[in-house]
Image (cartoon, rainbow, N blue to C red):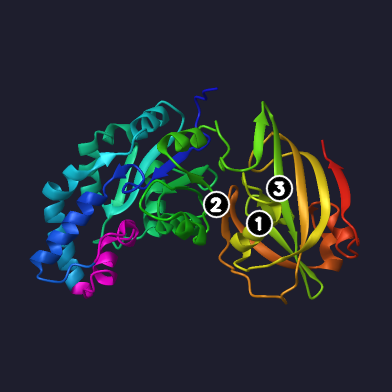
Amino acid sequence: MIFLSCIYDFVLFDLDGTLSASAPGIRRCIELTMEKMERHTPDLSDYSRYIGPPLITTFQKLCGLSLEEAKAALSIYLDYYDTEGEPRNSLFEGTRHMLERLRASNAKVAVCTSKNEVSARNVCNFLGITDLLDALCGSDHSTGRREKEDIIPYAMETLGAKASDKVVMIGDTHFDAKGAAYNKVDFIGVSYGYGTKEAMQQAGAREFAYSPLHLERLLFGEESLSADDCRFDVEQNRFQLRVGAVIIEEGCALMAKCDAADYYYSVGGAVKIGETAEDAVKREVFEETGLHYEVDRLVFIQENFFVDGVVAKGKRFHEVCLHFLMKPMGKQSIKTDGSVCAAGLEYMHWIPLEKLGDIKMFPVFYPEKLVSLPDNVEHIVTNEL
């Protein structure tokens, strides 16, 4: 089925490694810059080390230049880029079709890049995609606008996006993921670019596209955001296999809550294709808490029927969730900056067991069952339809 509307109101694209295969040109210009400055050229074989961060940062951290030298290097680099960098750019296959389809949809689209805005516009002109964009937003060192944390709100303001609008940042590096989390907008990482999936995950990313075609399908709601999740849709119905982590330390249970929800819920998430449930729950706990909990035992098998009102709004869910009791580690320090989930930023909370019944939470049986865990696996059916 083909959908005409994008699921987002505003779509922000990184440029290098997301829309444009630009690595050869960037590498060549850094090499020429260092040669002209008669400085040692570092190993540039790992693109993730210098595609994504602002060039000033690259020249300082990767090339070992002082701030003043980095500013001079940036000027030299920009002089070279017009003739040596720009012609080495090309669109990733499928990118033009995606942008054309977004252009014909309800969404507003912007390039949101740490590349100098003038250079970014020249690249987009060269690639022939400027007329498919509603805005083109890049860095401007004269104003102090360098990092994605600063460029995302600039792009949103340029497009006229409000806090209540659905906004997504799409990029290939942890700089993009961090910028999205900082500004509390959704993020989709692309695994075909120059950054690494692992680095993006460490910055909070949880959703990934493996090609521009896959990304297009995600943006138009034609495929689950996590294509490798154990789930499938039948019209307005969705089946999914999920895991939940029962983590109890010092009389408190660890629960999650995201910005978009008025309730708390179990730590956990979807099982991936080919992944065991035990591996899934350990992965989910680490992604959400930064801690390596081990599984003690399976404690609940839950069949859950409900209508989602936050992420897949209006869908009727048939969910099977395996709840695992995790081995205690003592109440450890949990990362407090939040992690990115499909509905926004997600935070962890230690809640006293005797207080669980005082708050709105899911699964609804946790307040009763966590106070006195069963000795054997218990099968529980919850139906909210």
Q: Where's residue 366, x and y in %?
A: 84, 57
Residue type beneath disc 1: Asp
- Measured Cα–Cα span from mark 1 to mark 3: 12 Å
**CB of mark 1 within 8 Å of CB of mark 3?**
no
Q: Is residue 109 left or right of residue 219?
A: left
Residue pictured at 77% horizontal, 58% vertical: 324
Q: Nearer the viewer, residue 8 or 81?
A: 81
Quadrant hosting residue 74: bottom left
Q: Which of 166 and 38 is in front in this view?
A: 38
Say what secondary structure mark 1 lies in.
helix
Q: Nearer the viewer, residue 140 or 77?
A: 77
Say what secondary structure mark 3 lies in.
strand
The C terminus, quarter of image = top right
Residue pictured at 39% horizontal, 38% vertical: 109
Q: Mark 3 points at which residue?
A: 242
Q: Is residue 261 left or right of residue 104?
A: right
- Was residue 158 drawn as part of the magenta stretch in this picture? no
Q: Where's residue 101, x and y in %?
A: 41, 28
Report the number of numbered marks: 3
- Label 2 neighbour load within 10 Å: few <14, some 14-19, many 20+: many
- Measured Cα–Cα span from mark 1 to mark 2: 16 Å
- Label 3 neighbour load within 10 Å: few <14, some 14-19, many 20+: many
- Was residue 50 drawn as part of the magenta stretch in this picture? yes
Say what secondary structure mark 2 lies in.
loop
Q: Where's residue 380, x and y in %?
A: 87, 47
Read off the magenta span. 43-68
N-terminal-most mark, 2 or 3: 2
Residue type beneath disc 2: Arg
Q: Name the residue under label 2.
A: 206
N-terminal-most mark, 1 or 3: 3
